[in-house]
Amino acid sequence: MHQLFTSGDIFPHILFSVEEFLLGYSLAAASGIAVGLLMGWYKKVNDFLDLLVSALYSTPRVAFVSLFIMMFGVIGIWKTAATVFVMVFFPVLMNTLAGVKLCEESYVRVGRALEATDSQLISSVVIPGSIPSIIAGLRIGTSLGLTAIVVGDLYGAQAGLGYLLFLYSNAYRSSDTMAVILLFAMAGIIVNLVLRRVEQHYSAWKPSIA
């Protein structure tokens, strides 16, 4: 395990997986929050997308890996990044949607009375009020996104921590396998610490219609 880090061989694989994760996770978080807000706030959008989202949400996400291999090939970051995206997108969307539905109705009524626009209500009331649910979705997405790194890198990849995990486990290199597993655990801890700080920032939120 010590030689794995002192030689520096693992660092390109760490960087590769970080790029895969950040690309898929950031796109999934942004789009999941946006679609969840739109579905939660606008009934017509919810009615239009609800059946499609329910169908895709019920589909095992690992089934999309074969599709991504055909679309992006087995080499490069896009196949695994797409796998991360599809694993993270749905829990973020569903939790954001739940957060909007549970948003304090009295605050919305006050905003309406003050003739606030939809954009003002969403930015000043709905998003801050939905933060706990959004953070919960992002935390679930973190675990699933890290799992997606392993799943995506198992199929023909030549770099990444998932690739190393597969390589070392097949070679019965238990200490190196444990080192990779610990790196995944550390990544999960780091992301969750960042999310906790964001949640704490909004913990004392009070509605404000500008």
Image: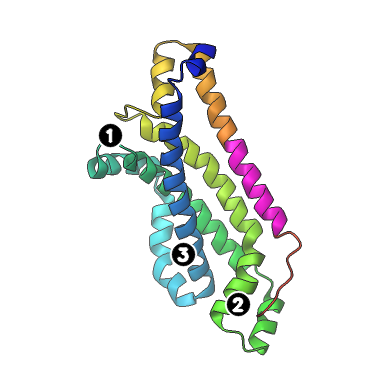
For badge 2, the amino acid type reads Leu
| Residue at x 54%, y 13% (from the top left corner) | 2
Q: Point out the stretch of residues depicted in magenta.
A: 188-201
Give the residue furthest to the front.
7
Q: Earlier in the sequence, mark 1 or mark 3?
A: 3
Q: Are marks 1 and 2 in contact (CB under 8 Å)?
A: no
Q: Mark 1 vs mark 3: give the one in front.
A: 1
Residue in view at x 32 percent, y 41 percent: 79
Question: 203 and 103: which one is in front?
Answer: 203
Q: Which residue is mark 2?
A: 121
Q: Secondary structure at mark 1?
A: loop
Q: Which residue is rendered at x = 65% and y = 72% of the image?
A: 125
> Mark 3 sits on what residue?
35
In the picture, the quarter occupied by the C terminus is bottom right
132 inside magenta stretch: no
- In this figure, which residue is indicated by the disc labeled 1? 75
